[in-house]
Image (cartoon, rainbow, N blue to C red):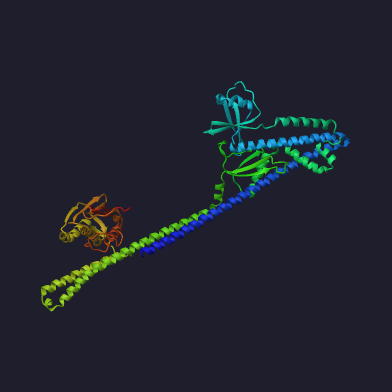
Amino acid sequence: MKKRSITLIIWLMSIALIGVMAMQFYFIKESYKQKSQLFDEGVKAALATVAGKIEKREIYDFAREQERANQAKFKADQAIQHRKERLLAQQLGIQEKIKRLQIQQFEYQQTYREAEENLKSLFPNAVYVNNIFYETYIRRKRYQSLIDFNVMNQYIGEGYYDTNIELSAKRKIPEVPAKDDSTRFIIPFFGNGNVEAIQTATLIPKVNSKLAFELHDLEKKLEDLNSTTLTVATDLFDTLAVIGGKSKNILKDVQSSMQLAKKPFRERINIQFLKSEIGAELAKREILVPFNIEIRDDQSLVIYQTLQSSDPTKEMKFAKYSTRLFENDLGSSPGLLSIYFPNKSFIIQDNMSYMLLPMIALLALLIGAFAYTLTIIFRQKKISEMKTDFMNNMTHEFKTPVATIMIASESLRDPEIASDERRVNRLANIIYDENVRLGNHIERVLNIARLEKENLKIEKVDVQINNVVSSVLDSMNLQLQKAGGTLQTEISATEDHVIGDELHLSNVFFNLVDNAIKYSKDAPEITVKTYNLKNKIVITVADKGMGMTKDQKEKIFDQFYRIPTGNVHNVKGFGLGLSYVNDIVRRLNGKIQVKSEKDKGTIFELVFPLKGANLD
């Protein structure tokens, strides 16, 4: 396969894999958005339902109380028949003034609430402080060290805490009177559980004193009139019904709303009922996860709060959902209910895990298949190149003896040469030697083929390694002398009997010595040793030839692999010898190791178990 084709395949597979990954990422992202949206809608619907149930429950309770009050009122109405109408105008005038003052006071309070709500939104830990304490301890900076912040976490059950911060003085000093009626807050900044700095904030007074005094005087006058002069109507709404001719039922509804609105917001909330209803409504929508509750009044003061965090001063930055409470009250809603989900992302991810795991497994499978395919392609390309090189080498090795035989045969056909017996014998010997050489090449290729098919016949007989090594070295001596090399032998093994095949062992040693001769740049220097190691015999064949790199050393036992020799082309072979050596050694329960260093030489070490030794 051409390099261009491989590159094209890699690019196409990479694009396909990246496309699959992009599609999976887009699908996961859109699924997460959809799950998050469904979660938000479910929580908001649950909050709206709970807010409606709280208001209905309050109305139901109030109606029962009002029914009892109406029964008493009816009896009182029977005794009151006549009223003095001449004082109604005065009474209504006072009521109109009271209404105007109440509107002014409401607007003033709204201004104060907005300022306080803005302060609370910026600094949730802001603590109200009275003006005497401010003048005594805070305004005079030398006494600020006497301020004590007491953060109290009251455990209220089920893993929730109610947090309050109280101010006190570590040591009493003479108090300084307040200089004005402004509303002041102190803002502590915590670090490592301690107050590291404080800041003060000053707002307008909570109540306009002038309006309050005027309103109090008018209400006192109206109260006096109601108690002494008003004999027809038992309250303001009865008066309006009598004068305006309005239906009492309509005015009763207005009266009920106003009376409920006047009730302190803290008293209108049943915490246990609220918690149970929130849990029930979330459970109906299959949202079974931990959550925190926070209730604030219309002044943004925390009425109730639960925390899952161990640090109550830490600002909550979780998914927040809010709804107004008692929205049907006259005027603005008196409170805000909020719930927080600390682990919203984990909840959604956990709900998506049933499809994330198969997608990840599929992606891993695709990546593994991609990597395996590339490995096979490169391996086949390498094998193809090695086989091509093998065919070239085999053609060259076969061509030489065939050409020699052809030339010798043509020479024998020459009558002059045929008449010379000496020359005929010489040419016959050449033909015989080249036939033997050609047969050896064919036998080597066939042996490798038999090894691959696992049907090479190997005899298991008693073999003396020292004798086999000596015989191979004797047969290789002529070739070594022709190369101008030297041979050193140390046959030191006293125990050399192994179970093996003498022919194949001879071929193993022949290949190793032959390689030592062929891959020596100069005159070969070869050392062959045998020695015993415990219940084994070790044979080493060492040379001082061209050596190998680490990468080459890892490939020498592969079929068809031949170490490059640069511009030197006198190293002949098929790249099958060491592959054959490795297979034979393995089949005879032996081990082969290679130690080599580039341009310094190579050592082959063969280890065989002695006859009768236990094999692991």
* Residue at the extreme bottom: 415
Instruction: Please name whichever residue, 130 or 493, is drawn nearer the observer in this view of the structure.
Output: 130
> Can residue 590 be spotted in the picture?
no
Q: Quadrant of residue 232?
A: top right
Does residue 469 appear to the left or right of 107 in the view shown? left
Does residue 14 appear to the left or right of 122 in the view shown? left
Q: Is residue 431 above or below residue 319?
A: below
Q: Is residue 142 above or below residue 24?
A: above
Does residue 248 appear to the left or right of 517 in the view shown? right
> Can residue 331 be spotted in the picture?
yes
* Residue at the extreme top: 174
Q: Position of residue 191 (x, y in %)?
A: 52, 33
Q: Position of residue 336 (x, y in %)?
A: 66, 41
Does residue 455 appear to the left or right of 308 in the view shown? left
Q: Is residue 133 above or below residue 95?
A: above
Total residue callouts: 0
Q: Is residue 602 above or below residue 235?
A: below
Instruction: Please name whichever residue, 404 or 440, is drawn nearer the observer in this view of the structure.
Output: 404
Residue at the spot 44% in from the left edge and 57% down from the top edge: 367
Q: Position of residue 537 (x, y in %)?
A: 25, 53
Q: Position of residue 281 (x, y in %)?
A: 65, 47
Instruction: Please name whichever residue, 42 or 95, is drawn nearer the observer in this view of the structure.
Output: 95
